[in-house]
Image (cartoon, helix red, strand yellow):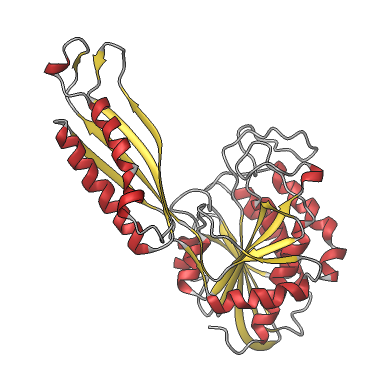
Amino acid sequence: MNETVKQQFEDMVQWRRTLHQHPELSYQERETANFVAEKLESFGIEVRSGLGGYGLIGTVRGALPGRVIALRADMDALPIQEENDVPYRSTKNGVMHACGHDGHTATLLEVARYFADRKDTLQGEIRLLFQASEEVCPGGARPMIDNGVLEGVDAIYGVHLWTPIPVGTVASVGGPMMASTDEFFITITGRGGHGGMPHEAVDSVVAASALVMQLQTVVSRSVDPLRPAVLSIGTISGGTAQNVVAEKTKITGTVRTFDESTRALIRRRIESMSAQVAETYGASANVDYLVGYPALVNDPQEAERFFEVAPKVLPDFKVEKATPLMPAEDFAYYLQERPGCFMLVGAGNADKGFTYPHHHPRFDFDETAMMASASLLIGMAEAALKSQDVG
């Protein structure tokens, strides 16, 4: 564990709890961005704000020339009413940090201070990306990239405080680590009529029900069983009364994959199957398909760096190979542009009651995990600055 980080842990806790008390939804992170900018400027760090909404970057330029390493944290909260009874609970009704982004932001602020205090001996540049709007597509990463935050960057790293694994464990993996995420919205249109005279109508509910069952075969019968994929129906709604044949029924769902060919295949099957099944029942189908975040794919060489660095900076921790996850992350966009590695830092602790999943009204995490996150980011950045194989 980095000794400087350990000594300044209480500051990280204070920052995190302040952010937790004042959460802001995606695309609304004005005060959060102001808080971050003020802290960075107090550390003597150059700040550039207004990137893709409320995103900002802090730049620490070393006295000596060298490589450029980017580190990223996300800042947005979720539309969830907090149920935790803690002194630092959210002060905003219906909004809470239920995914750990407050901890990510506090962690990167500590990393920023660490490098700012060492810029006279720093060889290279540390670029600190505080990104808005990770939780809602199209997300904040792509606009940050479009604003040039990766120009000249040799490698990029990010961490996620992750309660499904216990504190004292860190994990990552080379190649695909988190899935792509797409959403679909299907409208089946039939012909409304009287429930007692169905022969004079076209029942959209029946057609939609048949389609829901057929969609369950897309993964099981169209996708290579060695390629992980998920197609889940989230909602089906249609009709206005028990004696009315519904003219329209709507279906929504999500698709998760790890490679682009499977992703494209599932989309084609959803679109073609929707049209064919609807036609069979004399109805029509309209498919609105929203392409979301791509799969997060770690650079194999940078993942190897993680497995070299983590045992050194966290000698008492378990360092594990991560199992790929179906949740998505827009950090994936950065990894499409530059080599890098996304890492999970265990933040669950059953003894302290930190067992609730991400996006739950009672989500919370063991704050000591922030020390591990900061130590890991610092270690990865310092190793990459010294390396000859970045980029």
Regarding residue 105, the answer to whether it shows in the image is: no
Q: Nearer the viewer, residue 88 or 213?
A: 213
Q: From the viewer's perspective, is 192 left or right of 367?
A: left
Residue 261 picture quarter: bottom left
Vertical relation: 98 (above or below) 115: above
Residue at 39%, 57% (x, y): give it: 225
Taking the spot 40% from the left edge, 33% from the top edge, the residue there is 235
Location of residue 135 in the rendering, given as x and y in whole percent from the top left corner: 53, 49
Task: Specify the quadrant that holds the N terminus.
Answer: bottom right
Furthest-left residue in this view: 200
Please say if 355 is above or below 70: above
x and y percent of residue 276 in the render?
A: 18, 41
Work out whether residue 26 or residue 230 is closer to the camera in this orientation and state it: 230
Nearest the eye: 225 or 197: 225
In the displayed image of the protein, which residue is found farthest to the right?
A: 7
37 with respect to 144 (left or right) = right
Residue 40, can we see it?
Answer: yes
| Count of marks placed on residues | 0
Q: Which of the pair 156/257 is nearer the observer? A: 257
> Residue 116 at what x, y percent from top left?
74, 73
Residue depicted at x 80% and y 51%: 14
Q: Is 358 situated left or right of 233 in this image?
A: right
What's the residue at 77%, 76% (across, down)? 312
Residue 207 position, x and y percent, is 23, 30
